Amino acid sequence: MGAPALVMLVLGLWGLDRGGMWRDEAVSLQVGRRTVPQIWHLLHDVDAVHGLYYLLLHAVLAVHPGEVALRLPSVCAAAGTAALVAALGTRLARPRVGLWAGLLYAVTPMAGHYAQEGRSYALVAAGATAATLLFVRGVGGGAWWPYGLVLGLTCWLHEFAVLLLLAHAGSLGLARAGRRVWRGWGCAAGAVVLALVPMVVVSRGQAAQVAWLRAPTAETAERLLRGFLGPTDEVFWVCLGLAVAGLAGLVGRRGEVTCAGVGLPVVVVPPVVLMLASQASPLYVDRYVLYALSGAPLLVAGGAEWVAGVVGVVGRLRPGGRPRRSPLLLPPCLTVTGVLALALSFLHQFPLLQKDRDPGRRPDDLAAVSRVAARELGPGDPVLYLPVQMRNVALTYPGAFRGTRDVALVAGAGESGTLYGREAGAGEVRRRLAGVDRVWVVADRRVLAGSWVPRDPVERAKAAVLRQEFVARSEEVRGGVTVRLYVRPVSAPPAPPPPPRRPERW
């Protein structure tokens, strides 16, 4: 357990201070810096699903508010997940399988990506993997209440972790578990569901937050599978082959869970169920099922162990079919061989890990936008955010916007219990814009290009006034964000009177 945790910790700390946050991390930072009453006020209207995470983050940022501190909980959680995956492999198979599985999790680019995200998903993965380990212990005769407690808390970090219950039910079915085990698991699962009901009720009322999602496709599923097994072709096909080989041990003795019997349902059931449900009401994003990644290393490591066993049996046979006195590969040599293969996989994917440390690889880089604003904007300059979410830049990097005048703002984010502040109505925004001759606009590039038309009437009013009454001058683009200066055109001066005509001479 120690080696995978150490590798994951080192990879997580490498390049952690990348000098820029993207929009979701910025929300985590600015909400985590609010007071507890302000966070509670916010959760009544938006982001209830992240409420527990924001409260945990508030305690962390109270010690040191900054980008590194924001991401440290995710790094520690990812290291813990790698150790827990190793513990699962050790318990379900043997120590070398645990070592391989834990190291494979640690070097997977998808795990490294979310280890450096200031969001809740790495913590959810750690909680879900811990719950799976407690599930295995429960099947082996341990108490079920720790399993229910850990999984219940994990579901309050993100409600879609409840899909892990379906995966564990599948594992019990593959193990042909007895009535006593089903009864103990069922009581714990029922307690988890009941504890989650308040979260579900509140979050359903906030479903407009995910209105931007689209139904997943076959390409979506393939992309997730490559994220779980390895994004490069060479690593992907080798891991896929080993995972398929690992299915040989899918069903063990009656009442006993196996490495494949736990790993396959965990890696398959939550993503598939969420993708199918999203065909009717889109809810799927790959990070929502990050916790399912822990099943993939178990399958691959179990497959590698099965292949090693086959090779060992063949190696012990002489040409005539009689067994040799010693195996072809001694266990220590076999363990080292597996570790070297994982090191080769890491080196092959190292360029991807290196690129991931670049803030430009995220959907946007708010620090780069703030640097543009600091260079271009001056005291007293009017600023308009289109849509309101773009105010996230000013809330996260307020120094770049110090002294500017927010044209549409009525109440700040903290006092209004919103993520980005409360703005004036459409009519008032039109009136305020009528009083300025120039305005800096921080906008989503899609809105200015016309490829996305917001539904909110205030946002439509902003875009209409800019289009009808102003002309664009200078602009700078950083990722998906545009900082553009709009100037009200000056009316053309009246044409000079024609020169007096000289009287004609007769």
Image (spheres, rainbow, N blue to C red):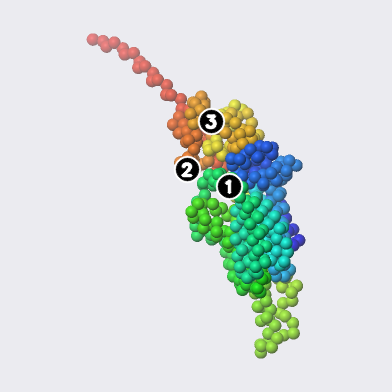
Q: Taking the image as drawn, is residue 85 in sight?
A: no
Q: Earlier in the sequence, mark 1 or mark 3?
A: 1
Between 295 and 346, the one lying in front of the other is 295
Packing grade of label 1 (10 A; few <14, some 14-19, many >=20) is few
Tag shown at residue 201: 1
| Residue sitting at x 46%, y 31% | 465
Packing grade of label 2 (10 A; few <14, some 14-19, many >=20) is few
Q: Earlier in the sequence, mark 2 or mark 3?
A: 3
Does 138 sit left or right of 380 as displayed? right
Q: Position of residue 424 (x, y in %)?
A: 53, 30
Tag shown at residue 424: 3
Q: For the residue labelled by badge 1, is the local secondary structure a helix, a strand or a loop?
A: helix
| Residue sitting at x 62%, y 59% | 165
Picture quadrant where residue 385 is located: top right
| Residue sitting at x 69%, y 48% | 71
Q: Position of residue 190 (x, y in %)?
A: 63, 57
Residue, disc 2: 452
